[in-house]
Amino acid sequence: MIAPAARNGLRVLDLFCCAGGAAMGYHRAGFDVDGVDLADRPNYPFPRHRGDALEHLARLISTGEIERYALVHASPPCQARCALTVGTNASQGWGSTHQDLVGPTRDLLGRTGLPYVIEQPNGRASIRKDLSLCGEMFGLGVLRHRNFELGRWAVPRPVHPRHRGYVRGYRHGVYRTGPYVAGYGNGGGKATVAEMQTAMGIDWTDVREELTEAIPPAYTRWIGAAFLTARQKVIA
């Protein structure tokens, strides 16, 4: 069920959209949203284009269709420099080679002439950390720290509140309870699908892989509202 919101007549292009965690937040902030993802995402709750996100963006730029959008959000694949890849997996020799698309994504976003948002998890992703958000800021049942690079606009950084306790589950062989669930992986006290849905505020997909990759809509609802405020100040 898509939550109703007052439309503001502005449209967001959601690149590497997955199942729509970011998209739903922008929608709830009042935007119309179009998604792009290479994989088939039937659970994505808004209009979407299946194909290579950067090729689609390049075509929109070349044809001038990019001018339909007020903002571009991009969540390029993050496995290459996420905390798990560069930490535990690297130390144990686990995992495989991942492609880092942050640089090519930023280059194309620069050509749009539009304000943009690049989202990445904690780790060594080569983005400016203009904004960092955490589930505790929104009273959520996950921490899910995410960093955002903001292009052609800015917003004051909110205070990161103190966490109320541990994330439930095993870590380094020790099981702990806490107010947050681990919305990734399987076993070891990790969240069930139902727990992830509740903790992140996502009810339109029950696919575990989509939930583990999603960001809570509360993040981009906040970003969307901040963008509208910043935009209004520029217009005024």
Image (spheres, helix red, strand yellow):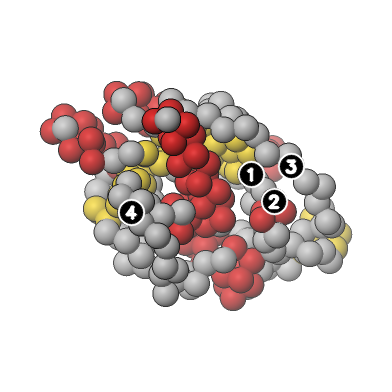
Answer with mark 3 or mark 1, whichever residue precedes in sequence: 1
Mark 3 and mark 4: Cα distance apart in space: 29 Å
Residue to which mark 1 is pinned:
133
Residue at horizontal 72%, vertical 54%? 136
Place of residue 20 in the rendered image (x, y in percent of width and height, measured from the top left)? 42, 58
The answer to whether residue 108 shows anywhere in this view is no
Residue to which mark 2 is pinned:
137
- Tell which tag, 3 or 4, sits nearer the viewer: 4
Classify 10 Å Cα crowding around label 3: few (below 14), some (14-19), many (20 and above): few
Mark 2 and mark 4: Cα distance apart in space: 25 Å
In the displayed structure, would residue 144 be above or below residue 73? Answer: below
| Tag 4 and tag 1, C-beta contact below 8 Å | no
- Tell which tag, 4 or 1, sits nearer the viewer: 4
Residue at horizontal 73%, vertical 68%? 189
Mark 2 and mark 1: Cα distance apart in space: 7 Å
Mark 3 and mark 1: Cα distance apart in space: 7 Å
Kindly indicate the quadrant of the structure image that contains residue 112. Answer: top left
Place of residue 65 in the rendered image (x, y in percent of width and height, measured from the top left)? 18, 38
Residue at horizontal 42%, vertical 30%? 236
SS for tag 4? strand
Residue positioned most to the left = 63
Under mark 4, the amino acid is Asp
Residue to which mark 4 is pinned:
32
Under mark 1, the amino acid is Leu
Place of residue 51 in the rendered image (x, y in percent of width and height, measured from the top left)? 24, 48
* Residue in front for this viewpoint, 65 or 178: 65
| Tag 3 and tag 4, C-beta contact below 8 Å | no
| Tag 3 and tag 2, C-beta contact below 8 Å | yes
SS for tag 1? strand
| Tag 2 and tag 1, C-beta contact below 8 Å | yes
Residue to which mark 3 is pinned:
160
